[in-house]
Amino acid sequence: MKKAKKLTKIIVISLLIFMFTYLGIYMLAKATKKLDIDSSNGYYLYDNQNNLINGTSDQWIKLEEISPSLINATISIEDKNFYKHQGFDYFRIMKSAFINITNRKTLQGASTITQQYAKNLFLEFDKTWERKLKEAWLTIKLESQYSKDEILEGYLNTINYGGIYGIENASYYYFNKSAKDLNLAEATILAGIPKSPSNYSPILNYENSKERQYLVLKSMVNNKYITESEMNEAYNKKLTFYGYLENNKLKTLRYFEDAVMDELDTLDLPTSFLDTGGIKIYTTLDIEAQTKLEKSLNDNFSNNPLQIASIAQNPNNGEILALIGGKDYSISQFNRATKSKRQVGSTLKPFLYYAALENGFTESTTFTSEQTTFVFSDDKTYSPANYNDKYGNKDITLATAVSYSENVFAVKTHLFLGEETLVQMLKRVGITSEVQAIPSLALGSEEISLIDMTSAYSTLANLGYKVKPHFIKKIEDSNGNILYEYKGKKEQVLNSSISFIMNEILTSTYNYNFIDYNYPTCYDIANKLTNKYSIKTGTTDTDHLIFGYNNDIVVGIWSGMDDNSPTDISNGKFLRYMWADFVEEYMKDKEVNWYDIPSNVVGVLVNPINGDIADETIKNATMFYYIKGTEPTYTDKNLEELIPTIKLEN
């Protein structure tokens, strides 16, 4: 009995100490400078013309203008005691802790609407104790300095509804109506999203959203907001989802926005919106490029089951002008342009051939085009094959090998240089993926991201200068103070003259002069092109890629299936059409300048297939470029006999 009284006394004293401590903290918070939450509304994204493209609160709406059904649904499912507690629901905290401890895993949370709003006022969401203490202090300040209605209004205007921030934006995105016009069925769908935005978005996961809607409706019944009959009617009501905001109907733009936010997470910025009054993010987005890139996708892949990823980059400064991470963000939020790694196939060959040019090869250096088995010292063999098993059974130039994308020629070059040479070359141009020094590397057997490959091609397009791909140009606070500004530097990693020659070689992929026993890989888009471009395609059993550029823009596109299942090789033509349609439309009415010939480079008319100096009998004579002193002579020989490390079996 004495022990029970003693325990009761300890509990009562502890509660009194806690109450007085909290009261003291509450009064201190109330006395401190009032939080300026009206101007701390999150972030705003602008394109490269300083036009607003998205923001957490670009459509702020007053609480009294929001549908009562949405307000009641939110309070009911998120924080039923919102109007009763002072920021923390202690009974709910103890109940959740008991349930989680009993089940040895987290099944319930206990954060209030005020706590969630405090969390929304931060730019990042780490889980350190320092961060949690800051959130707790903000929670108390919010409760002591603002009314419940003001807190709820701020929360509803900043919460994440599946990548759409704020209830007014979300209402227009999902239902094309204002939040004041939401009915019970619509309101309970939206109220269910913030718990897990990617899982409960009705467009991304309809079944999950309906399960969540049922829980929201049931909580409203339990809390006496609606009747069972109203619940059933709302749950069974057929809904039509809109899927975009009226000011921008692009289905792919939010992939770009996600990439911006991913980059934002890597920057050293003030941790709280309260320190900045919200932030303005000025991005590299060229909305014209994004619009035209999406149109070219729709024109060529609208009825095709393949997924698409694409990047358009300015090679001179690394700015990403447009990005597509998938065919439709409302169907899949996975950004294939930045987060997926796939086999890149023959699109790796330009870096192999650049290394070859750097090591004494020229455009007219020849190997024999023939079926070849490479036998190594440990008696292992490797037998790469050309597409459709087409071989010239004669000497062909390096430029012809590029035009046809000859696999045997590439492997011979790779082994001649030494397999480590290509590995080091890829590191030089900014490929971050770990690649193995193996024979098949020359054919792109390793997996690399689209953004890495596009950046690598930018190095060639930029005549050997590497630039960092980026999405953010500048960040300002609400007063116009610059918090961050991109100041990347160009780094020369390749020789400019050799890069020029490589760029010229890559025009062979659509040059009719190379038609012989095979056709250039991009000859079917030659009639679409009014400007000069360097282009290279790549195909594996599962992936199709194309990269092309001039000195103003680099565009890379990938297509394939998310599950890596085999695809029809004929799909490559749609990729080529998409690339040509976009680049030509984007460059339309723009001044187009090709690269100037470097002073140490000379051009010679040759037979493009065998590299012999052209005479009046050669109808397809083509200009090849050489570093001065390496121009072809009549005594140039095939390099086959110079390969010391392998045996060739025909």
Image (spheres, rainbow, N blue to C red):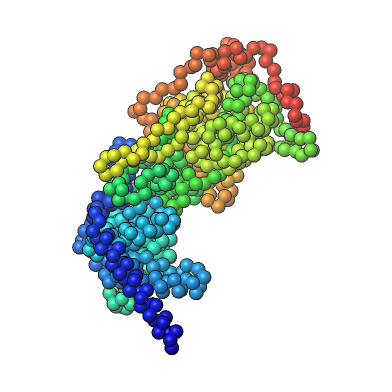
Residue beneath the point at 44% across and 84% down: 3
- On the image, which quarter does residue 115 sit in? bottom left
- On the image, which quarter does residue 613 sit in? top right
Direction bottom: furthest residue: 1
Quarter of the image that includes the N terminus: bottom left
Q: Position of residue 140 (x, y in %)?
A: 30, 62
Residue beneath the point at 25% across and 63% down: 27
Residue beneath the point at 61% across and 20% down: 362
Q: Is residue 234 visible?
A: no
Q: Position of residue 338 (x, y in %)?
A: 48, 44
Query: Where is 328 relative to 314, above or below?
Result: below
- Left or right placement of residue 363 versus residue 81 in this view: right
Quarter of the image that includes the C terminus: top right
Residue beneath the point at 71% across and 37% down: 383
- Left or right placement of residue 512 versus residue 478 in this view: right
Q: Position of residue 404 (x, y in %)?
A: 59, 30
Q: Position of residue 303 (x, y in %)?
A: 45, 49
Q: Is residue 192 visible?
A: yes
- On the image, which quarter does residue 550 sit in? top left
Q: Nearer the viewer, residue 142 or 45?
A: 142
